[in-house]
Image (cartoon, helix red, strand yellow):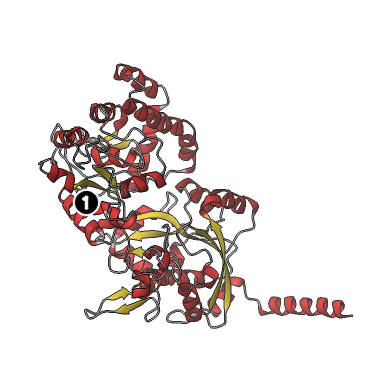
Amino acid sequence: MKKRLLILFCILLMMLSACSGKSKAEEDLDNLNESGMPIVKEPIELDIFARQALVSNDNWNDVLVFNTYRDLTNIDVNFKMVPDNVITEKLNLTLGGGDLPDAFHSIFLSNSDMMKYGKQGVFLPLNDLIDEYAPNFKKILEENPVIEKQITFPDGNIYGFPKITDPEFFSYRTKEKPWINEKWLEALDMDMPETTEDFYQYLLAVKDGDPNGNGKADEVPYGGREIDPLFNYLSGAFGIKTKGTSNANIDLDPETNELRFYPISDSYKDLLIYLNKLYSEGLIAKNIFSITDEQYRANTAEGMYGSTVFFNPEISVGGEKVKELTSMPMLEGPNGDKQFVTLSPEADNKSAFIITNENENPAATVRWIDYFYGEEGMKLFFLGVEGETYEINDDGEAVYMDHIVNSSEGKTMAQEQSKYLTYQGGGLPSVTTEKYFQGTAESSEKAIEAAEKLRPDVIEDPWPPFIYKEEEMDKLTTFGSDIDKYVLEMRDKFIAGETSFDEWDHYVQTLEKMNLDEYLEIKQAALDRFEE
């Protein structure tokens, strides 16, 4: 009897819904407050797939930032937390299996996947929703038209809210920076290097001059967690990567101002010859191609390196020895080139927040995420709640409270932050600013000084990652991937001396036979669309 009554009750509910004549979208708008808080009149729930970085809070369903925001908005979010180490597998299963959440938060999807699922209708196009319900984000696009270009796909649609960096937050945009052991410079009676030749002479002196004074040849002139940071730093001294590092293997030729595949240029070869000289003479750590991140950090903390390229070591590594490291300027190369090329675009993750076709409250969801692109939302997202995680100092500035800055449990500042906040780990749908992005390697005084030292030589208008049409992406995932992989493989072999430069012509000929012409045609078409 009870079962029969339950069935009749369900049928009655469906009939009442049908009689109302309202679609889910109309119900969404009827329940929506167009401005102010709460966002909705009657509470709603959202299911959101969220990437959980190792350094972030592991349960966003019970954390200060989102508990506070739930009470403010009338929207209760059920976060499905997916750890970083299984994110790719879980994303593929979710997107392929049809059991979609209402939205994805802080994930990293390729442009091709975003375009693919956008065209299929799995991801909602956001253009009209942004225009109607995202005043904070819309203002950002109006004030920074380049950001809109960076996140708009070839079909004219925007499929995700991006992670944005304030264009003026220069220290964050310059990422990893060059550092040198100032104490060893003094011990060797040497000046700060200004050219690649000066840098070479310093590395030689570190190797042979016992600058740590222990009577042992245990100093490592240059150490890194991989070769890429040093390679990128020196690229601008050899005239390559003239439009930044977001698009592998292409830039603008400074002589012709045309698209160039720089891995077959003389400038690129000269850079590899220089790096090979450093490596073969023992001036670069021999384990540069195999060292783990943990070992690199331990070596840095012990003061083993005469130079490195990394985020501010005092924050990223810690310890007394790293205080001996000071920032370096951009070096001038043998032909007078002097550009710092590692400047990220303003929008560097287009998939920070994506709304799916399963979402029955898209307008409310857009209002929910848009808050974090405004002043009050950024303060909540990055600093938390006044009196619980931050306070206002005598200068009227919001700063973290002492229990976060000076942990009573011996934890790092990031670990204390993650008890209350969720932005650690990157990929976030908001705006990183120097004002609110506090206590990080990029916002530290030393990192800001390092960035200012590089500012006179930084490139202008770096390219964002290009967006390709579906048929172009199909080709780039075949022969394009083969080209990129071969370039990277041969780069390391040339540097390590595993392949002689006598093989250079063979290397170039091999690339030319790998559909290089069509590869460049696709890149040119993407560049043309971006510049239109």
Q: Looking at this rendering, what residue extends furthest in the front direction?
A: 215
Q: Quadrant of residue 391?
A: bottom left
Q: Position of residue 173 (x, y in %)?
A: 29, 54
The mark total stands at 1
Q: Quadrant of residue 192?
A: top left
Q: Position of residue 35 (x, y in %)?
A: 43, 80
Q: Amino acid at mark 1?
A: Glu
Q: Position of residue 355 (x, y in %)?
A: 52, 62
Measuring 20% from the left and 46% from the top, which residue is drawn there?
181
Determine the secondary structure under disc 1: helix
Q: Is 122 left, or right, of 33 in this rendering? A: right
> In the depicted view, which residue is nearer to us: 41 or 311?
311
Q: Position of residue 521 (x, y in %)?
A: 37, 33
Query: From what the image shows, is residue 72 above or below residue 91?
Result: below
Query: From what the image shows, is residue 252 above or below residue 424?
Result: above
Q: Quadrant of residue 379?
A: bottom left
Circle 1 packing at 10 Å, graded few (<14), some (14-19), many (20+), is some
Q: Which residue is mark 1?
A: 324
